[in-house]
Image (tube, rainbow, N blue to C red):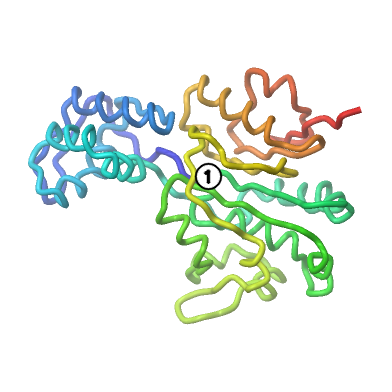
Amino acid sequence: MTAAGGALAPAGVATAMTGSNAELTPRDFAAIAAIMHEDARIALSAAKTTLVQSRLGRRLREHGLARFSEYVALVQSDPAERHAMVVALTTNHTHFFREPHHFDHFREAVLPALKRKQGPVRIWSAGCSSGEEVYTIAMCLLGTDRTSASWLRNADVRLLATDIAPHVVESVKRGFYADSTAEAVPEPWRGLWMKPVQGGFQMADEARALVTARVLNLFEPWPLRAAYDVIFCRNVMIYFGDPAKEELEAGFVDQLAAGGHLYIGHSERLIGPAARQMRSCGHTIYQKPEVH
């Protein structure tokens, strides 16, 4: 999922970048960290100094800047570059059928109810990265043979995939995955819903038709009108401080329909009001109680 992350370095250490002699001073790092927290609630500790210096070195070179202080000044005056910086400091890491117990639960405990539902079915992959999660959900909906996918023909089912990074949202829209990435998809799903093409696999039209991909900052207003039956937001909140986690989780609870399910990452937990409002029904799996 997309969030700030990467290799750690000792606090305060800043090594030279390939092709650049720019030093990331503590003052410049603090300014960058403040912007990341303000715009995306991502908490950057000083241990991430080397990571920040490495990832932003390319931005300095592209703008012909010699010092990070110049880059900070640019970011503070240029909204487009500010957004580009936030995107550059997010990490896009995911794979198909990641944390498989979530998908086992989804297929066994949630999918039967979705098939019986009268009315629209809405599922959200929040922090979708390059789309492996949302397409895993799509394949679970489609099933293990073409007959099992027939229920979708007369159902109103939509999957929303959102991420703060435009380039990974474009990857979701393309639905193309390299051979090495597609290897994680077990049969029969890969054979049914992924088409071999030059250099990799293309998601089948049936899967792509279910998915809408959009750029969205989770800490900006959500233009979502529908209540969602299922929300996946996994391995995103590990990069936030507790106040941001509490805010985001409360938003997810509000966005869920009664009886809806929330899946979060293996090392994450619900805190604040969300923890009191949701019922645990598996490891990092929660359900919003039905209204009686």
Element type at marker 1?
A: loop
Relative to 279, say whether 133 is above or below.
below
Q: Is residue 231 above or below residue 206?
A: above
- Which residue is at a point 60% across and 38% down the rendered structure image? 265
Question: In the drawing, does residue 94 fall left or right of residue 253?
Answer: left
Left or right: residue 37 versus residue 70 is: right
How packed is label 1: few (under 14 Cα within 10 Å), some, or many (20 or more)? many
Query: Hey, which quadrant is residue 148 in on the image?
Result: bottom right
Which residue type carries mark 1?
Gly
Q: In this picture, is 27 found above or below 49? A: above
* Residue 237 screen position, x and y as percent: 53, 33
The residue shown at (86%, 32%) is 290
Q: Residue at x 64, y 33 (%)?
A: 252
| Residue 220, percent from left and from top | 48, 34
- Image point 47% across, 81% down: which residue? 198
Front-lying residue, 86 or 179: 86
